[in-house]
Image (tube, rainbow, N blue to C red):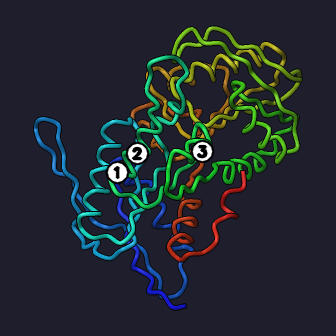
Amino acid sequence: MYYKEHRMELFACRASKDFAVKVIDGMNKLAEEGEQYHLGASEVTLFSDGEFVPSFNDSVRGATLFIVQSTFPPSDNLMELLLTIDAAKRASADKIIAVMPYFGWARQDRKDKPRVAIGAKLVANLLTAAGVDRVMTCDLHADQIQGFFDIPVDHVYASKVFIPYIKSLNIEDLAIAAPDMGGAKRANAYAKSLACPVIICHKSRERANVVASITAIGDVEGKNVIIVDDLIDTAGTLCKAAEVLMSKGAKSVRACATHPVLSGPAYDRINNSCLEEVYVTDTIPLSPTADTHKIKVVSMAEIFSAVIRKVYHYEPISTEFIF
């Protein structure tokens, strides 16, 4: 059966322009003869009351349209993504794929106490209502968020870039640690690939973003530990876990987290902590004014380049989802 392949257009909202440029570069490296990808031209008109309206400078009629935007800080960037999706739909794009390297509100995946919202489900509903046909994202805080959508969700893992990077460091006496019980599955997957033991940290919270206490379960003595997590927010849990591990005899403690949210005092906490290094991806850009001498960025752009290109060409993408 013959089908006509629609042309591809890739646009970026303001929060992810730099990441989108790297994605385009990666796609052009993978391109076959005759293929050439570019970032489409768009703009955002601002009003004095805080409203804004995105618009496309190029025609998107009949195109398979990829829109790149991480939703951090979540409110304005999510709204910009929703408005851009709506603009694409009204401009007669054939298919609209939201590429969300970081999916905001992912920590609100359930009711953990009475009378609270499930923000991740609401975001899924908003994206669907805006007219998106598919979502691509990376290291959701909870895998079950994929089930909040009735459209395809491509969920890629940063382990595809982190595990080779960690192997390249040739760290002796390596151990992988989870910062809490919820991260045990992720830590176990990393430890299995790196052939090293797992340490589990158990934490209790006083309130959101405030950790009361942490205990470590596992053989810490004499280990070079890497704490793995999906994101770093205020870095309170991370730095306290590093202190506990060092107090139990670890040789050194490093951290590896996909999304560098790094809000509030996070940069100062990391710089003043016993952490040797922190490895993050570029799903969220680092603050240009912060001291980042302990932070090393490993890019996810090539992974997204491969997935976007394969989705556009209707090729299998299962090899990109190995944890």
How far, Cα to Cα, is label 1 from label 2? 6 Å
Q: Are marks 3 and 1 in contact (CB under 8 Å)?
A: no
What residue sits 56% from the left and 49% below the top? 138
310 vs 297: above or below = below
224 over 154 or under it: above or below = above
Quadrant of residue 4 within the rendered picture: bottom left
Q: Do the residues bearing badges 1 and 2 touch, measured as CB atoms within 8 Å?
A: yes
Say which residue label 2 marks. Answer: 125
What SS does tag 3 mark? loop
Residue at the spot 12% in from the left edge and 42% down from the top edge: 47
Work out whether residue 3 or residue 59 is closer to the camera in this orientation and state it.
3
- Check the image and report above or below for 184 versus 1: above
* Amino acid type indicated by mark 1: Ala
Q: Residue at x 83, y 32 (%)?
A: 198
Q: How would you rate the neighbour count of disc 1 (Cα within 10 Å): few for under 14, some for 14-19, many for 20 or more?
A: few
Left/right placement of residue 159 relative to residue 248 reads left
Write down the residue under mark 3. Answer: 139
- First in residue order: circle 3 vs circle 1: 1
| Image quadrant assignment for residue 43 | bottom left
Check disc 3: other Cα within 10 Å, few if <14, some if 14-19, many if 20+: many
Query: What is the distance, in whole Å, between disc 3 and disc 1 at their CAs?
Result: 23 Å
Q: Is residue 34 left or right of residue 85?
A: right
Q: Position of residue 48 (x, y in %)?
A: 10, 38
- The N terminus - image quarter: bottom right
Type of residue at label 2? Asn
User: x, y percentage for residue 221?
Assistant: 88, 21
Marks 2,3: beta carbons within 8 A: no
- Closer to the chain start, of discs 2 and 3, is 2
Q: Amino acid at mark 3?
A: Asp
- Mark carried by residue 129: 1
Q: Kindly report which numbered mark, 3 or 1, lies closer to the viewer in this rendering.
A: 1
